[in-house]
Structure formats: structure tokens, C-alpha cells
Amino acid sequence: MLLEVIALSMEAWLFYNSTVLHNSLNVASDYANLMLSFGTGVPIIILLALPSSGKQYSRAFFWIDMVQAILWGYIVYLKLFGVIPFTHTAIHPASNETQIIFNVTTSVAMIIVAFFRFTSATTIDEKNFFRFLTIFLVISDGMLNLHDIVAGGFTTASYYDLLGTIPILISVMLVLALPYETPEGSIPKPPGKIAEILNIGCPSLLTLMLMGAGVDAMTRFFNFGLGVVAIGFTLYLIRSVIIQRNLERSERSLKEARDELEAISLTDALTGVANRRCFDDTFVAEWSRAVRTRNPLSLLIMDIDHFKHLNDTQGHQAGDDCIAMVAKAIHGCLPRSGDLLARYGGEEFCVILPTTDSTGAQIVSTKMCETVISLAIPNETSVGPHVSISVGIATCYFPTHLTSHQLLEAADKALYRAKKNGRNRVEVALTSVLL
């Protein structure tokens, strides 16, 4: 709208100088006025090429589309007026009929695209804006084309020229009537099929228009037309490189987010060790590996002694702190990175020790008990003044007819015996023999 106001003001000034003051026409000013008139279509073309709200549209894409739209408008100027602006050669405009056909065709195409952008808008604000733009294009282009048909062949100014100025006033009223953007109106909805086609097709169509116009310009201005084709091809390559870079970044970000989400889904929030789901998956995998390799597999189940007493006397926050400290301590006792500590539920933990026999499992369990006692977490019970743990061990040697579920039950029964025999101790399941 600003460009149209400037172009209209310059046209009025040229008309005043030539008809009222009888000054000779300034060719450079006339060129500038014509270029401004064509320049008013550049912002509209860029707007129509914009992706739907919520889609990535970098500043580089904006400048690429800006350059393409300006070059396309410039080539159209050459096509219709047959002269490179700001030169001393005479203007050789196309016939009035050719200009009318071009203007009508271009207007109809822009109105159709604007209407589809309106119907496929993904936000309320976008829908309001393209409703305004469609109405403006219908009124503006309708009046301008009517002016070209009615008064395009006149050699002198007439009141018909007002048909080209009224749309500017109408656009001002439409802009003032356009609702303000709101937080609710900017929330995007999933794009439909038409929106997806426009998001992909509009920028590509702009490039095709530019290169097609460049090829056409080569018939009269070969070097310039060839340069435009080269520029269009280069801009297309730049856009492709940016899209590829953005795609790779998006895939990398998506993978990182997926990995992080998977890690969260397999990690206990309080202790930071593996959760029950991770334990179940790992136990199945390690059991299958032990069956194949025939290496022993040890399973430890432990819980904190008299944990309810600590919760009742010191509060749930102290209980959570105790669980977190115990988990950190027993995790530090694991001899290998392939061993798994998991919070099985409440104050109960499980440890999977692949390729570990019963003796090795007892050594690890004893170290865990001693480490927890050394934390000196207050909990005055029959066991002593500090928090302790009880551990049940079950080891399976292969080949065997036992199942993974039976191994888990054996470790649980061993833990029960450890509690029954006084707590703060390690008990080994009776199934820890070759069967």
C-alpha cells in the first residue's frame, strides 16, 4: 500500500508538471514511476509465497523470494515496455491488448492463490489476513483491469484514471477493519492437503516463473536474460542447501529428543537409576544371552530395612532422600558398566549381574551392605542406629530347566530369608546350583 501511495503521488506530480506547468516530461521520473507501479506487486507475490503459520521460514528464504519477485517484476517490465529502464532509448511498449491479457491473467492467478491461502489457513489470524488480501485483490485488480480496458488506449488523462486510485482508499479501510492478532488466533492447527501443496508449490512456482521469464527475455536481451536464469538457478540451489541443512538439523533434534524421551521412560525419576520397565527389558535380554553363551547369570533383590519406620518418624521427604542416597551408594558398588541396578518398586532394588557366579554375587552384595551402613543415615531400629539393607541372591547356571521367572522368585525368597534371619545380611537362594 505504501508503494502504491508513492507511485500514485509521483504520477500526480508528473501529470501536474506536464499539463499544468507545461514542463517537459522527465524521462527518468517516468521510468521511476513505472518501476514503482510494478513494484507494488512484489510484496503481494512474496506474501502469497509465504508458508502457513507454524512452518519454518528463515530470513534467508525471505530474501531469496524477495530477489526472485523483484527480478520477475523487472523482466515483466522489459517484456511490456521493451526497454531497459533509465536508458536513453525510446520505450517500445507492447500493444494495449497484450498488456490487458497479461494483467488479467496475472490478477486472476494471484486471486486464486490468495483464495486458496484463505481457505487453507492454519490459524485464525492467517485466515483473517488472507480474507483481507483476497478482497483487496478482487477490488484492486478488478478496477485496474477495468481502467485498462476502458481508458487504456487514451492518450490524455481522464476521470477514468480514478479507477486506479480508488483501490488504495479501499485497502486503507480494509487494513483498519482487519482484527488485531491475538494469542488465541496465532495457535496453528494441522495443515490440510491444500496448505501442504501451497507450502511446497508456491516457492517453487516463483522460481519457475523467474527462470521462464529469463528464458523469454533472452530473445531480446540475451545477456540479461541468461544472467537472470543463472541467478534463478543459483537461488534454487541455495534454497535446496538450506532446506537440506534444516532437514538434517530437524532429524538430529528429533533423534536427540527421542533418545532423551526414551531415557526418561527407562529411568526412575527419584533415584536416576533404571526403572521397573528397564529392568524387565534388560532381564529378558540378559537371560536370552546367558542361554546362548551358557554363562552364569546372577540376580540380586534388596530392600531397605525398616523403611516404614524411617518414613513414619522422619517424614516422606527423608524417606525419598534415603532411597536416593542408597541407590547412589549401591550403584557405585557395581563392578562393570554392563551390570544393571533398577528400582523395582518403593524401597526395593534389583541388580542384574551377567556372567557372574554365586561367589562373585556374594562379594558384590556384601560390599553393598557395608557401603550403605557407612552412609550413617539415621534410623534407630533393632538392626542398629543406621539404615541398612537386606539382599537375596539367586544364580542360574546353564544349561538349565529353570525359567527367568523362577530365578526372580528364588531371589525374592532369599531376600525373605535375609529379613527373617535378622536383616542387614545376604542370603543365597538354594537354586544356585547346576540343575
Image: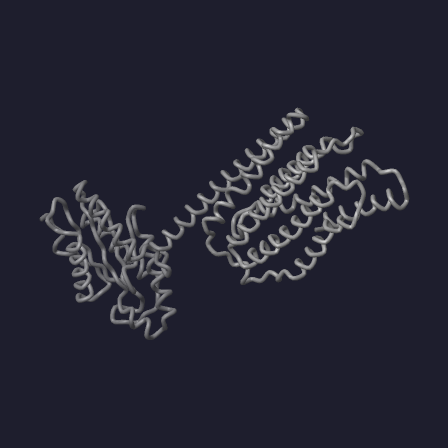
Residue 400 drawn at (x, y percent): 11, 47
Closer to the camera, 28 or 337? Answer: 28
Up-down relation of residue 312 to residue 269 (above or below): below
Q: How many marks?
A: 0
Q: Is residue 322 left or right of residue 126?
A: left
Residue, x 56% and y 55% (percent of image)?
126
Q: Is residue 174 left or right of residue 122?
A: right
Q: How is the image coloured?
A: one colour
Residue, x 18% and y 50% (percent of image)?
358
Look at the image and tell me whether residue 10 can be seen.
no
Q: Residue furthest left?
A: 435
Residue 6 drawn at (x, y percent): 76, 48
Q: Is residue 211 left or right of residue 308?
A: right
Up-down relation of residue 168 to residue 183 (above or below): above
Residue 403 drawn at (x, y percent): 14, 52
Look at the image and tell me whether residue 229 can be seen.
yes
Closer to the camera, 304 or 191? Answer: 191
Closer to the camera, 112 or 191? Answer: 112
Q: Residue furthest bottom?
A: 313
Q: Where, by quadrant of the figure, is residue 151 drawn? A: top right
Residue 173 drawn at (x, y percent): 69, 59
